[in-house]
Image (tube, rainbow, N blue to C red):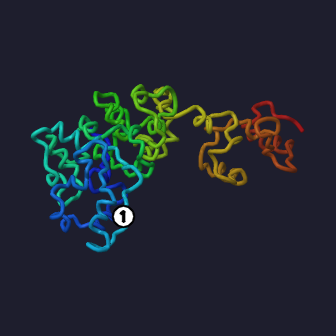
């Protein structure tokens, strides 16, 4: 199993979040290559911790002064990079030691490296999203620590192939991963609030408590109901709820059940569409559904329930009792009232 990974557009030394098109179109690295002996001439952060990845505007103006070269209008991006990458050029080069690659080994044609290039160098020969869970933290920080990412950034996270499995939404899918030794990898893309989109019932699984809180995580939509709930599951959920009620509580709260399972189901909103009351006699007569699944007999009583008299104006109770008393017993039993 794998978890979502994000490769942001800020890994390369030439990229600021959301600025790839503008910077690439406005600067020709090949044309300037002969003027600068190393990449660090402009991109100081490659050799100095805490320095900007962008060159100072004054450095450009040394040539682009209107005499040597035409004047250019450029300034460093003011906003910090938006990224969840655990990467620093200096620390990376120091830890690699003699094996540290040259700039061009990663940044071919002055472009950001492909994620597979990073994985290959770290001995992981697979596609980015198919990388094992244990590899996530090697390149990425937890979502809650990537504070500069916006909800829009998070919503664009790509899901790995394992998440598309029909059974991944169940306890034997993502549940087993969350309980496993690499559960911390879930934090790369998820936080408690994401889990609470489904686990909103009883005490949530312990694995959720290990995640940090981050409301931005709800930018990733949950998968919704499991496959077992398809095919008008409302009509056949009873046996499963009776046998494994505690399992239902993992996603459902009592108020959801009470939308239907209450003494007077029609007394509140949430089940029948607007205007249903006026046409419900025809629906009941046509047996579109079983009214008694939610409503008791007292629902059509002038004395209880919604105090709705089913007989209508001008109803002759005595005539009905003489002509067809069996109809009366459906509601009144043997105690048929006399008017």
The answer to whether residue 48 is visible is yes
- Does 240 sit left or right of 277 as displayed? left
Quarter of the image containing the N terminus? top left
Q: Position of residue 114 (x, y in %)?
A: 22, 53
Q: Is residue 117 above or below residue 327?
A: below
The residue lying furthest to the front in this view is: 67
The quadrant holding residue 183 is top left
For mark 1, what is the residue? Answer: 74
Q: Is residue 198 visible?
A: no
The foreground one among 213 and 194 is 213
Q: Position of residue 28 (x, y in %)?
A: 23, 67
Q: At 48% across and 36% down in the image, what residue appears?
A: 196
The secondary element bearing badge 1 is classed as: loop
In-front residue for pair 198/3 = 3
Image quadrant containing the C terminus: top right
Q: Quarter-wise, where is residue 185 in the image?
A: top left
Residue shown at 42% from the left, 30% from the top: 208
Q: Is residue 251 above or below residue 280?
A: above
The quadrant where residue 66 appears? bottom left
Mark 1 Cα within 10 Å, few/some/many (few <14, many 20+)?
Answer: few
| Number of marks in picture | 1
């Amino acid at each position: 199993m794998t978890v979502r990974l994000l490769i942001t557009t800020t890994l390369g030394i030439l990229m600021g979040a959301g600025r790839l098109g503008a910077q690439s179109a406005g600067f020709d690295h090949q044309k300037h290559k002969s003027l600068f002996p190393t990449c660090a001439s402009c991109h100081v952060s490659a050799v100095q911790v805490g320095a900007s990845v962008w060159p100072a505007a004054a450095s450009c103006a040394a040539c682009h002064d209107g005499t040597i070269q035409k004047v250019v209008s450029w300034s460093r991006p003011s906003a910090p990079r938006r990224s969840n990458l655990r990467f620093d050029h200096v620390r990376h080069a120091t830890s690699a030691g003699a094996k540290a690659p040259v700039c061009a080994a990663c940044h071919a044609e002055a472009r950001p490296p492909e994620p597979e290039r990073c994985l290959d160098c770290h001995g992981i020969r697979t596609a980015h999203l198919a990388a094992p869970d244990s590899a996530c933290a090697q390149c990425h920080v937890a979502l809650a620590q990537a504070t500069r990412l916006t909800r829009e950034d998070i919503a664009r996270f790509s899901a790995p192939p394992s998440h598309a499995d029909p059974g991944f939404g169940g306890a034997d899918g993502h549940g087993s991963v969350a309980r496993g030794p690499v559960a911390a990898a879930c934090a790369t893309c998820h936080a408690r609030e994401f889990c609470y989109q489904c686990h909103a019932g009883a005490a949530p699984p312990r694995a959720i408590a290990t995640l940090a809180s981050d409301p931005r995580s709800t930018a990733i939509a949950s998968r919704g109901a499991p496959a077992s709930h398809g095919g008008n599951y409302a009509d056949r959920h009873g046996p499963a709820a009776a046998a494994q009620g505690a399992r239902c509580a993992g996603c459902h709260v009592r108020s959801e059940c009470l939308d239907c399972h209450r003494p007077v189901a029609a007394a509140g909103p949430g089940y029948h569409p607007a205007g249903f009351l006026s046409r419900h006699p025809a629906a009941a007569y046509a047996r579109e559904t079983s009214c008694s699944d939610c409503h008791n007999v007292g629902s059509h009583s002038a004395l209880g329930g919604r105090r709705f008299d089913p007989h209508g104006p001008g109803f002759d109770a005595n005539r009905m009792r003489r002509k067809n008393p069996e109809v009366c017993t459906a509601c009144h039993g043997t105690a048929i009232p006399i008017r």
